Amino acid sequence: MNIRIVLVETSHPGNIGGAARAMKNMQLESLYLVTPESFPDSAAVARASGATDVLENAVVCETLAEAISDCRLVVAATARSRTIEWPQLDAPQAAAELTSLASTAPVALVFGRESSGLNNHELDHCHKMVTLPANPEFSSLNLACAVQVLAYEIRLAVLTAQGAVQDDESMDISDLPASKENLERMFTHLEEVLLKVHFMPPHRAPTLMRKLMRFFYRSGISEEEVSIFRGIVSELDRQDSLNEQKQDRNNREVDK
């Protein structure tokens, strides 16, 4: 239940049904849809071929950020090479990481549009990317097929992990990887303060913040570490404000 399949702006409802069928084949149940073009739809029900419970329980969201706000690991499925360097996984690695963390927290595997996949802004919301070793001259899989392949890898990872009993309750919530919602708050806070202290000019902020985001995604920063880091940023902000006040007082004294 903690492994979430997220489909972004799916244009053909039949692909939603096909994805639901692929999920149920591999015992996955949690489907999130970000602004689908048509849903609910009879074409989705027809392609689901009995996996109607997955469709009926699907959660429809307005944005990707909403769909993954409580997730501790978000992996983007993409066929396109990117100019942005992002942590890359193959299918077994992605399945293993998702399955391992799903025992204690929600995780998500995100699929983009049929025609163009995920854009760079959406990729910014994802910790890592997974690609399939398809024909480089014909690498784009049908959406439902891509879901099937990765769902199968997740199923293998689950079966492999069975028997390795872990005391999940021993992990404190502060030790879990930070949720996407808290990471987004941290990134916003950090950007505001870095701009305030003139660490970076506004026109360079998107590039630098993307690099910093990549760094934190690779680190697997925990909830407790996010709190510590935000405390450091808050103190930098406070010290900058004190310095400004001191400078203002000095300027007034000079004017006198």
Image (spheres, grey):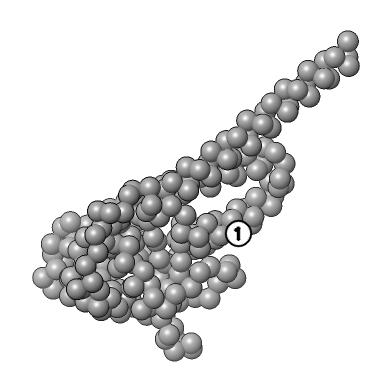
The answer to whether residue 4 is seen in the rendering is no
The answer to which image quadrant residue 131 occupies is bottom left
Would you say 33 lies left or right of 223 here?
Answer: left
Residue at the left extreme?
50
Would you say 239 lies left or right of 228 here?
Answer: right
- Judge the density around disc 1: few (<14), some (14-19), many (≥20) Cα neighbours within 10 Å: some
Residue 58 or residue 68, whichever sits in front:
68
Q: Position of residue 169 (x, y in %)?
A: 24, 53
Q: Can you say which quadrant of the picture contains the N terminus? A: bottom left
Residue 139 or residue 192, whichever sits in front:
192
Q: Work out whether 98 lies above or below 225.
A: below
Number of numbered discs = 1
Q: Can you say which quadrant of the picture contains the C terminus? A: top right
Residue 208 or residue 138, whichever sits in front:
208
Which residue is rendered at x = 63% and y = 30% of the image? 238
Q: Which residue is mark 1?
A: 211
Q: Amino acid at mark 1?
A: Lys
The answer to whether residue 129 is seen in the rendering is yes
Q: Work out whether 231 lies above or below 20.
A: above
Which residue is rendered at x = 26% and y = 67% of the image? 16
Q: Position of residue 112 (x, y in %)?
A: 40, 66
Which residue is rendered at x = 13% and y = 73% of the image? 49
Would you say 164 lies left or right of 246 here?
Answer: left
Q: Position of residue 171 (x, y in %)?
A: 31, 54
Q: Work out whether 252 lies above or below 189.
A: above
Question: Of helix, strand and loop, which one carries label 1?
Answer: helix
Q: Position of residue 30 (x, y in %)?
A: 23, 60
Which residue is rendered at x = 60% and y = 59% of the image? 211
